[in-house]
């Protein structure tokens, strides 16, 4: 039976947003077990994207905050028992700041931990609508070298660094996420540049090294997109440990 959202949510719970899908038992997008909402629409065109079907802002399905909260609250017991909560990912959540902010506010009213998983590619004003309602930000920094970042994502690095500095200014708990792609994101100067930058941020709790994988390749083929990394292998355990060691040498907590 669905649980009706309490009256504390009522004034703006009719706000709608577009989502791609949800994951009811996520274990990699924040602490504990997470109810993960994947929003629809993304301005990035990452070469290794595993959700290319999230690109179009007109895709997915339209939902109200109230309906989504009713679904989330069905899983409240195991979210709380695991020390988890709700993560809003994408796509790019900051394309829908009003919807995401209200969803997270309603989660906080219910005592649920909230996390925002973002590329940071947005107007700072959009992020400022959402961050007050995020207990944690998962900030994806795809690369630190501006040219390499553009090659990987087809957009500018500047908005992401601007958001990273803003999160530091307001001391918002943040996890930095970096995808290790052999032969693409692994040049030493790129890694050292990222490490040096993150080491200046006193709000960062950890840096996560995420190994590249091919699990989304079939989606590219299905959508008729050219997948340029089809011959790229995931990093070996040795490569992952070498990168972690480099980051740790700058005093960073690495996962």
Image (cartoon, grey):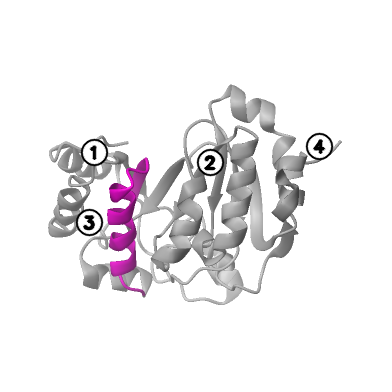
Q: Secondary structure at mark 3?
A: loop
Pointer 1 or 3: first along the chain = 3
The reply to whether residue 71 is in sight is no
| In this view, the mark in front (4 or 1) | 4
Q: Nearer the viewer, residue 75 or 102?
A: 102
Write the start and end of the magenta stretch as one range. 155-179
Residue at 39%, 60% (x, y): give it.
120
Q: Earlier in the sequence, mark 3 or mark 2?
A: 2
Q: CA distance from mark 4 to mark 2?
A: 19 Å
Q: Earlier in the sequence, mark 4 or mark 1?
A: 4
Q: Residues within 10 Å of mark 1 (few under 14, many from 20)?
A: few
| Other-residue count near label 4 (Cα within 10 Å), few / some / many at <14 / 14–19 / ≥20 | few
Disc 2 marks which residue?
114
Q: Position of residue 86 (x, y in %)?
A: 58, 41
Marks 3 and 4, how far apart at CA: 47 Å
Circle 4 sits in a helix, a strand or a loop, which is it?
loop
Residue 96 in the image: state x and y as whole percent.
57, 64
Q: Which mark is residue 186?
A: 3
């Amino acid at each position: 039976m669905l649980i009706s959202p309490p009256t504390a949510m009522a004034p703006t719970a009719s706000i709608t947003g577009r989502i791609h899908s949800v994951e009811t038992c996520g274990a990699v997008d924040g602490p504990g077990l997470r109810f993960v909402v994947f929003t629809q629409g993304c301005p990035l065109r990452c070469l290794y994207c595993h959700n290319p079907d999230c690109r179009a802002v007109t895709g997915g399905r339209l939902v109200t905050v109230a309906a989504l909260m009713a679904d989330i609250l069905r899983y409240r017991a195991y979210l709380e028992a695991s020390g988890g909560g709700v993560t809003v990912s994408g796509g790019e959540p900051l394309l829908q700041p009003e919807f995401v902010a209200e969803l997270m506010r309603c989660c906080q009213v219910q005592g649920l931990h909230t996390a925002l998983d973002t590329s940071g590619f947005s107007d700072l004003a959009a992020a400022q609508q959402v961050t007050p309602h995020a207990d944690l930000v998962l900030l994806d920094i795809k690369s630190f070298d501006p040219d390499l970042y553009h090659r990987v994502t087809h957009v500018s690095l500047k908005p992401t660094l601007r958001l990273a500095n803003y999160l530091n200014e307001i001391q918002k708990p943040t996890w930095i996420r970096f995808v290790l792609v052999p032969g693409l994101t692994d040049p030493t100067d790129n890694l050292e540049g990222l490490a040096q930058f993150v080491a200046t941020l006193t709000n960062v709790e950890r840096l996560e090294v995420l190994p590249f994988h091919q699990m989304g390749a079939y989606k590219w083929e299905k959508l008729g997109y050219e997948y340029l990394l089809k011959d790229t292998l995931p990093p070996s355990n040795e490569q992952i440990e070498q990168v972690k060691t480099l980051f740790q040498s700058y005093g960073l907590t690495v996962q």
